[in-house]
Image (cartoon, grey):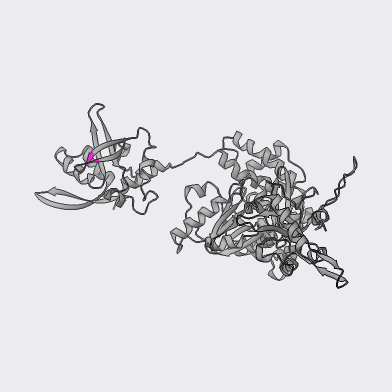
Amino acid sequence: MNILKFLKPTIHTPEKGVAATARVTNFVRPEGGWVPMGYTLDGSYVVLSLKTGQLVTLRAQDLHMKKLQVWLGLEVRNSSMVYDNDIKKDVVEPTAVVEEIAKACDEMGLFDFSRVRGPGLYREGDDLVVNFGHQVATADGKLVPLHPGHKSAIYQGGPSLGFALDTPCASSEEVLRVLGVLGSFGLGGKGDLIKLAGWLVTAFFGAALPHRPILAISAERGSGKTTLIEFLNALLGPQAIRRDGIPTTAQMIYALENRSATLIVDELEGRGSKKAAVETFMEMLRIQFTSSSSQRLSRVIGGKTRYYNAPVCVLLLGISLPSFNAATETRTVRLNLDALPEASRLYYEWLLDSSRESETVALGARLRRLLVSRWNIMRGTMAAVRPMLIGLGHEARIADKFSPLLAGYVAMTHDHVPSPEELRSLIAQMDLSQTAPATVERDAEMCLSVLLNRKVVIYKMTDGAKEKTHMTIRDALTHVVHGDAAAREPLTRQLEEFGVRPLWVRASASWKLAVCSSEHHEGMRKLMMRTDWALGGWKDVLQRLPGAKASVQKVARSTQRVVVVDMPREVLEPEDGDYDFPEPMAA
């Protein structure tokens, strides 16, 4: 039996003026079956089982009827039955099926596991493709074929998203009820409700959006942050996973191996967290901000490459969140959650009642079904808002960060794309009408500041006796530039032991600073210990400073490769702090 012909769907072209009914592609069929996908590097065949909805790798030892029937269903057995004239009955002859699998998979070519998409929402051009877990369809009812092209995405079944195309949409009253519950928490900042509601919609659409900002909420004790997490988790249903504390990379990627989901992290605290664990976690979070052509991560485990998904959206909550590095901070939207208002403490809200969680989950399913129908509103609003934010003077990263939040709020509350006037009003409510002065600390400036602030041991002669003191590199340089001429050379020679040498350039009558650039210099390695440049990165970073250049200088009686920079202004023109104290009170 030609299984490919059996699997080929019949496509009916709707008549003009008649709306096409929504059609879905099911991953599982009662009789089973298979769809060829290709072959792996070791020659094994990959097929999509229509019994389980999962991809199956068939090795040589698997190509016999018992395993094929278990993995691919009774259809394989039924199509292999032939009549034996000798015994006058039907018998199983798997040769034809095996040959058909081999031929069909060989024609598909090498299989790319990075193109596999489990349950979740994805974008194909302007269309929204929803993999519900048991079936896949576009938001406007276009058919999604299981038989992939050579470069198209490959969908497989998995755990249900908790709703389907036949799930009823949430009513406007239910949407207002959800917004009211979100607003009942202590959101004190301007536009915080828009940001929180917009993030909820962004988390739902997930990988279908080009950018998904990290939402970090610092919460006061008694603010109900755990209640807020449980409410958001119930609304998102299976599209969210929750963790307490910093999850390891292994925990995250294993949880997201075959699914697309949002990560909600509670109890993320700066106190007691290990720096290495926080940095590794932040690196994983930055991956999810921007969609790319390849959404999947890979790890080699047991000699075999396995593929995982990054979180499609992230929510971080804690009483005292750890400090984020600059790269993570630019991708983060921060909210502060104050203590619950008195009205919220006394008012009963059934959506927050844990004994009625199933009703909240059902409401979340209806809300997500409504958002699927409003995909074009979400997409159209993002396309309109982003250039408006850039036109107001915001950087592209800021526009990428806030446009999905504003579009998400619009998709939840509107049944059409708002006018430019309405969008400008929403931008003003989010306090984005004016650009805040950007204070970006460059890596080169940070590196030089760390170097100048390092304290070292300095010896100096006082009344004929050698005295040991501790001072920063900055103070030592200041003494060389402005101090006693007799003490300049001894102080310079001591600084050279740390790889730092002040230079007086007679030709330009100016001070320069030479910093040893070799990662093997013992003094510089000590100064840069436990910094971002501990492995020698200071050489490249310092050369980004204005006027910096690579050179060769005598440092500590030996020739060294150095980076020569202008002497910092705070050394050339030291300023005493201006302090203002009250006059002493009269006796």
Left or right: residue 272 compared with residue 220: left
Residue sitting at the far left: 464
Place of residue 198 in the rendered image (x, y in percent of width and height, measured from the top left): 66, 50
Residue sitting at the far bottom: 87
Place of residue 163 in the rendered image (x, y in percent of width and height, measured from the top left): 76, 59
In this orientation, which residue lies closer to the viewer: 271 or 422?
A: 271
Q: Residue at x 26, y 43 (%)?
A: 500
Which residues lie in the magenta part? 554-559
Residue sitting at the far front: 86
Instruction: Report the label total.
Output: 0
Residue 505 appears anywhere in the view: yes
Q: Is residue 372 magenta?
A: no
Q: Quadrant of the N terminus?
A: bottom right
Residue 161 location, quadrant:
bottom right
Q: Residue at x 66, y 63 (%)?
A: 60
In this orientation, which residue lies closer to the viewer: 259 or 305?
A: 305
Residue 318 appears anywhere in the view: no
Q: Is residue 556 magenta?
A: yes
Place of residue 531 in the rendered image (x, y in percent of width and height, measured from the top left): 37, 51
Place of residue 83 in the rendered image (x, y in percent of width and height, measured from the top left): 86, 67
Left or right: residue 573 compared with residue 83: left
Q: Residue at x 48, y 58 (%)?
A: 278
Q: Would you say the magenta stretch is mainly helix, strand or loop?
A: strand
Q: Residue at x 27, y 46 (%)?
A: 473
Left or right: residue 416 compared with residue 495: right
